């Protein structure tokens, strides 16, 4: 039967391609690691008391970060998506911006900020410094995910609750359980982001499992040990994510009414000032203070550096945007396809593959890509920007897959079946019914992938083709030994470019939503 | 949807064409700060017409990118010339069989002392280790005169060194181990710990903390010290261990290696010869105060000449080997 | 000749068996009501006939042609000439009323789309709503749109899955009468699923009472109300 064959092709052929492009490099690296260990006992030497202690400590720090950030994200998400408050549009955009600042720059700005304010920042060089910075950088992710889940709850659920129990209890007993999966996925994503960042703990002199892996790679060049440790980290993340997939992601509690669901909004007239104060406090901590520090640093140097910074950054800006756009298109397309085959055709392979490349430490992913693609015949990939697109896909494909998959699950199957019975071809059902209904999810996935691709450094650093100029790489390689004012100016330029683009995206999004009458 | 697809393909093509290979090129991986190395590579491009494609990295994050890349690319090298800020990395690559030996008229201008004996790397323009201090926090006459003074209780908790696992600091420590012998060196390191040494993330971080007034003084490289002087009037630097019987300060040259089996060998050699010249050394002296190794190179006034500095007497290869020996110990020391 | 025949159909969702050896012939041109408590397998019968589910065992024939058998769909849904009104109506939220109805015609390259759509809209008295979107309609209007959409391709079989569950009795009766009229004109077979036995008594020519995946009683209204089954008695009483 034609439809079944087409379905098979749609599901299997790209899976195979994805496996060849991203799965095989990782497997090849794993095999090399297993085969090349001359001394078999050395293979397991990375597991010891010391390692276990470090893993425990890292999990504790990142767990606290994930908990705090998810909590903050939930509160902000509620205030911004469920309440009638002035300037929510502004807050939504502004609070998203910390995601654009690399955690390292954020750490530097905060450290300097504290020193500038109090003349002492010794307390900052500790676990709590790492926790503070990571929480502030990653909470917008939770805000975005939880906020969008909140705005999708049908008003009737809450209203039905309000008939029988007080508001607070209703939140706890009805709203929270309804957004359980959004909360869990935020928690896990942030946990993984925090676990895999080495720049902030390294800067604050805090030893974590990731800095340990980094040290093995960069000081001792001990590849087998570093890869072994990475595999351990990978297994931990994988277990967490699989637990989540097993218990939560398919829990059938999400229903979007086809009658054009209306989200309930609350007013709280008397407490408006309190909420504004709360949001501003967050804004100051997460955005104003770091940007202010960057601003003063770029202005108080002995010379003005904006011009010089622009001369340095200029050529990289266009290239970065171009690449991030291509990468984002690729990520969104693959995310859409992989979400479709998972939700509708029950093919899990691409999903698991993207999860794997997402949680593997950047250095390992980079090395796997180099070892696999650095062949004369594959030079058209390794020697060109294609390798970067693959790297972006590996790093962020999973996030797009999750966001789009969530959206897909909320489209009632009956909408497709109604068209199927009338003999509408599958591709047309997909293009005319699924795609338009997925626009909000596609848009969210697009913007997030773009932000993340623009700033990606870990893998990019390892695989970017010689001679390519990219904003994060340039900021990073130049910032080492130039006056602080220049670095700060460059970061501000980065931030401005991203901000302008995101504003453009949001305008385009508004137009799209309006056009398809569904937001 | 189809339109989107077409647009994607067009974009891909654009990128592909943007990165197409031209044959007359040279690929250089560089760990010297991009602000200083890039202008020189551009000059080479202009003068020879050979296109330079560079991958930059920075010592600030331990050159992880470039180093791991070179090691992973071993079987099909993409890079022609490796330009490193110090010889340690070249030495690591040499042990991994990644560098090739190269000798020419230009390499002969450099003293044997600053070269690997089989010409796997050749040094040029050098930096030195210095003490950087904040004039507002410590008087010039009460500064330590030697690294061994750091253990003086008077300085307790007031000074920093960068993480000894990385960069020039690790090389400095290894040189001290070679000079003093393991036992004495370890004792000194432990005494530093006991005297509250702050371990900064990098040399740049040492500079910044001293500049900000977080700490009174610290060890860093001449280029960082010169930058700091430009940025802040409160900062100055001195060379340590300059008295008669002292061990002298550590001198670290830039180091160039030709990569074994590289794709553009001839252009790679041309680039190396270009870099190993008085002109390049003068440019580096002007831009980041690096001290020329070729005799008779023109110097700006504010850059000291190597002739006027008492330098530590070391063998770079032995020191590199030592470095690998003591790294596990250093790791422990840093992490305790 | 009976039009739709289900022979020894068993159907499972995972481990859960929802139909067990279900055999029945639905008569042509008549309205058969499937009634029973929720979860008894009524909807599954409709979905099997539509070709949206594959039977775990048994055979389904329409007009003497085998359309499904154990483990496979022989004729795909759109070639079975069925219309389906879903329980949740499944109106496409991003299409206007007009587009919802016209979508299938447009795909068939029909030349007279506009007239046909408005014919149906007028038949239901909602032609003024053509430009509205589903969320701008009342419950009853949405149901009319859903029914009009399922009839636009002039199916031989109309499958209705409790589509009138949430509207008031008065409106429901009017709509059903309307539907009966249309059925007389167009001569289609209608299968109507409901859990409300009074509605079934009013609507169906024949009744099938189901419980736990099996038929408890079937036949005309009179025959069913005289059934000796304890289950049927208590279900009809409630």
Image (tube, coloured by chain):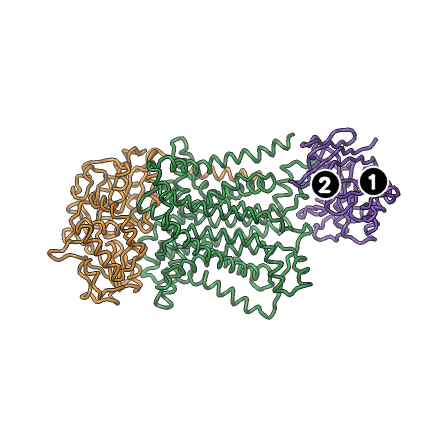
Chain colours: A green, B orange, C purple
Is A145 positioned to the left or the right of A475 in the image? right
- State which tag comes first along the sequence, 2 or 1: 2
**Quarter of the figure with the N terminus of chain B:** top right
Q: Position of residue A37 (x, y in %)?
A: 35, 37
The part of the image, by quadrant, that contains residue B315 is: top left
Q: Classify mark 2: residues with Cα within 10 Å, few (<14), some (14-19) or many (20+).
A: many
Q: Position of residue B138 (x, y in %)?
A: 23, 66
The residue depicted at 35 percent of the width and 49 percent of the height is A477
Crowd class of label 1 (few under 14; some 14 to 19; many from 20; radius 10 Å): some
* Residue A456, position as x, y percentages in the image: 43, 48
Residue at point 23%, 56% (across, down): B189
Q: Secondary structure at mark 2?
A: helix
Residue tagged by mark 1?
Answer: C218
Q: Is residue A64 visible?
A: yes
Q: Is residue A438 above or below residue A16?
A: below
Which residue is at the far left? Answer: B244
Q: Nearer the viewer, residue B171 or C106?
A: B171
**Residue under numbered circle 2:** C44
On the question of residue C118 being in view, the answer is no
Nearer-the-camera pick, B178 or B89: B178
Foreground disc of the pair 2, 1: 1
- Could you tell me how far apart the alpha carbons at marks 2 and 1 are, in whole angstroms? 18 Å
Quadrant in which residue C66 is drawn: top right
Query: Residue drawn 61% across and 69% down?
Result: A269
Q: Is residue B9 left or right of residue A415?
A: left
Q: Position of residue C55 (x, y in %)?
A: 70, 35
Q: Mark 1 falls on what kind of element?
A: strand
Say which chain tag 1 marks: C
Q: Quadrant of the C terminus of chain B?
A: bottom left
């Amino acid at each position: 039967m034609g439809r079944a064959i087409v379905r098979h092709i749609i599901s299997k052929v790209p899976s195979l391609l994805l496996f060849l492009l991203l799965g095989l490099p990782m497997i090849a690296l794993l095999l090399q690691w297993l085969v090349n260990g001359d001394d078999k006992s050395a293979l397991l030497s990375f597991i010891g008391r010391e390692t276990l202690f470090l893993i425990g400590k890292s999990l504790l720090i990142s767990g606290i970060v994930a908990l705090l950030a998810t909590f903050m994200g939930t509160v902000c998400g509620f205030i911004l998506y469920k309440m009638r408050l002035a300037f929510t549009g502004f807050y939504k955009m502004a609070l998203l911006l910390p995601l654009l600042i690399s955690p390292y720059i954020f750490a530097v700005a905060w450290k300097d900020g504290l020193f500038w304010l109090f003349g002492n920042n010794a307390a900052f060089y500790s676990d709590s410094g790492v926790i503070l910075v990571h929480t502030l950088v990653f909470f917008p992710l939770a805000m975005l995910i939880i906020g969008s889940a909140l705005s999708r709850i049908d008003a009737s659920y809450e209203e039905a609750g309000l008939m029988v129990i007080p508001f607070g209890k209703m939140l706890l007993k009805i709203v929270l359980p309804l957004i359980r999966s959004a909360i869990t996925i935020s928690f896990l994503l942030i946990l993984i982001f925090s676990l895999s960042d080495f720049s902030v703990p390294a800067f604050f002199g805090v030893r974590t499992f990731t800095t340990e892996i980094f040290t093995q790679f960069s000081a001792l060049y001990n590849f087998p040990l570093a890869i072994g440790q990475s595999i351990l980290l990978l297994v931990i993340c994988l277990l967490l994510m699989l637990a989540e997939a097993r218990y939560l992601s398919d829990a059938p509690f999400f229903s979007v009414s086809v009658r054009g669901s209306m989200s309930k909004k609350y007013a709280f007239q008397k407490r408006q000032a309190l909420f504004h104060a709360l949001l501003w406090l967050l804004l100051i901590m997460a955005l104003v203070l770091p940007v202010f520090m960057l601003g003063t640093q770029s202005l108080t140097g002995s010379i003005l550096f904006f011009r010089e910074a622009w001369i340095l950054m200029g050529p990289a800006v266009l290239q970065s945007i171009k690449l991030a756009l291509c990468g984002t298109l690729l990520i969104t397309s693959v995310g859409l396809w992989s979400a479709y085959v998972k939700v509708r055709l029950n093919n899990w392979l691409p999903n698991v593959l993207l999860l794997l490349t997402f949680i593997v430490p950047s250095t390992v992913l980079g090395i796997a890509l180099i070892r696999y693609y650095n062949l004369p015949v594959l030079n058209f990939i390794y020697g060109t920007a294609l390798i970067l697109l693959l790297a972006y896909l590996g790093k962020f494909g999973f996030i797009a897959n999750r966001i789009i998959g969530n959206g897909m699950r909320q489209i009632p199957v009956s909408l497709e079946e109604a068209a199927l019975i009338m003999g509408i071809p599958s591709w047309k059902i997909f293009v005319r019914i699924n795609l338009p209904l997925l626009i909000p999810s596609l848009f969210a996935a697009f913007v997030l992938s773009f932000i993340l691709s623009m700033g990606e450094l870990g893998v990019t650093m390892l695989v970017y083709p010689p001679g390519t100029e990219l904003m994060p790489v340039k900021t990073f390689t130049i910032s080492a030994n130039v006056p602080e004012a220049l670095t700060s100016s460059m970061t501000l330029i980065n931030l401005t470019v991203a901000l302008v683009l995101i504003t453009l995206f949001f305008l385009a999004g508004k137009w799209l939503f309006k056009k398809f009458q569904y937001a | 949807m189809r339109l989107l697809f077409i647009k994607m393909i067009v974009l891909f093509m654009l990128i592909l064409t943007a990165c197409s290979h031209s044959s007359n090129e040279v690929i250089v991986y560089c760990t010297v700060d991009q602000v200083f190395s890039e202008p020189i590579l551009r000059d080479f491009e202009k003068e020879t017409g050979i296109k330079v494609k560079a991958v930059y990295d920075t010592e600030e994050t331990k050159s992880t990118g470039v180093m791991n890349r070179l090691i992973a690319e071993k079987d099909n090298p993409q890079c022609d010339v490796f330009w490193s800020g110090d010889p340690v990395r070249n030495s690591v690559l040499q042990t991994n069989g990644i560098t090739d030996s190269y000798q020419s008229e230009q390499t002969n201008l450099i003293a044997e002392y600053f070269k690997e004996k089989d010409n796997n790397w050749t040094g040029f323009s050098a930096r030195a280790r210095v003490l950087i201090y904040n004039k507002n926090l410590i008087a010039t006459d009460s500064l330590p005169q030697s690294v061994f003074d750091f253990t003086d209780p008077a300085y307790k908790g007031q000074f920093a060194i960068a993480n000894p696992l990385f960069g020039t600091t690790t090389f400095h420590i290894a040189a001290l181990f070679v000079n003093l012998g393991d036992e004495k060196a370890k004792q000194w390191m432990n005494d530093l710990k006991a005297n509250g040494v702050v371990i900064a993330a990098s040399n740049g971080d040492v500079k910044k903390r001293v500049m900000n007034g977080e700490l009174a003084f610290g060890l860093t490289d001449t280029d960082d010290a010169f930058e700091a002087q430009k940025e802040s009037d409160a900062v100055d630097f001195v060379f340590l261990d300059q008295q008669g019987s002292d061990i002298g300060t550590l001198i670290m040259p830039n180091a160039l290696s030709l990569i074994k089996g590289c794709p553009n060998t001839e252009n790679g050699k041309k680039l190396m010869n270009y870099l190993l010249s008085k002109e390049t050394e003068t440019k580096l002296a002007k831009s980041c105060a690096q001290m020329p190794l070729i005799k008779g190179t023109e110097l700006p006034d504010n850059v000291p000449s190597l002739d006027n500095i008492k330098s530590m007497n070391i063998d770079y290869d032995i020191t590199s080997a030592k470095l690998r020996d003591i790294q596990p110990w250093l790791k422990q020391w840093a992490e305790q | 000749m009976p039009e739709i025949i289900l022979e020894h159909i068993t159907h499972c969702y995972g481990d859960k068996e929802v139909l067990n050896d279900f055999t029945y012939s639905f008569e042509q041109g008549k309205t058969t009501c499937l009634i029973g408590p929720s979860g008894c397998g009524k909807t599954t019968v409709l979905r099997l006939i539509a070709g949206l589910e594959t039977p775990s065992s048994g055979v389904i024939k329409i007009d003497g042609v085998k359309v499904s058998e154990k483990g496979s769909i022989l004729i795909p849904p759109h070639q079975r000439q069925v219309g389906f009104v879903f329980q949740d109506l499944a109106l496409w939220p991003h299409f206007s009323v007009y587009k919802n109805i016209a979508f299938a015609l447009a795909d068939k390259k029909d030349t007279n789309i506009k007239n046909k759509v408005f014919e149906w809209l007028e038949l239901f008295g909602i032609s003024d709503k053509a430009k509205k979107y589903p969320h701008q309609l009342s419950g009853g209007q949405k149901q009319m749109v859903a029914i009009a959409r399922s009839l636009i391709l002039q199916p031989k079989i109309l499958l209705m899955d409790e589509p009138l569950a949430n509207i008031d009795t008065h409106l429901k009766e009017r709509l059903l009468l309307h539907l009966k009229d249309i059925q007389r004109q167009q001569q289609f077979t209608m299968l109507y699923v409901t859990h409300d036995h009074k509605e079934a008594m009013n609507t169906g020519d024949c009744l099938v009472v189901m419980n736990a995946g099996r038929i408890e009683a079937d036949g005309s209204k009179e025959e069913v109300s005289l059934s000796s089954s304890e289950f049927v008695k208590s279900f009809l009483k409630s």
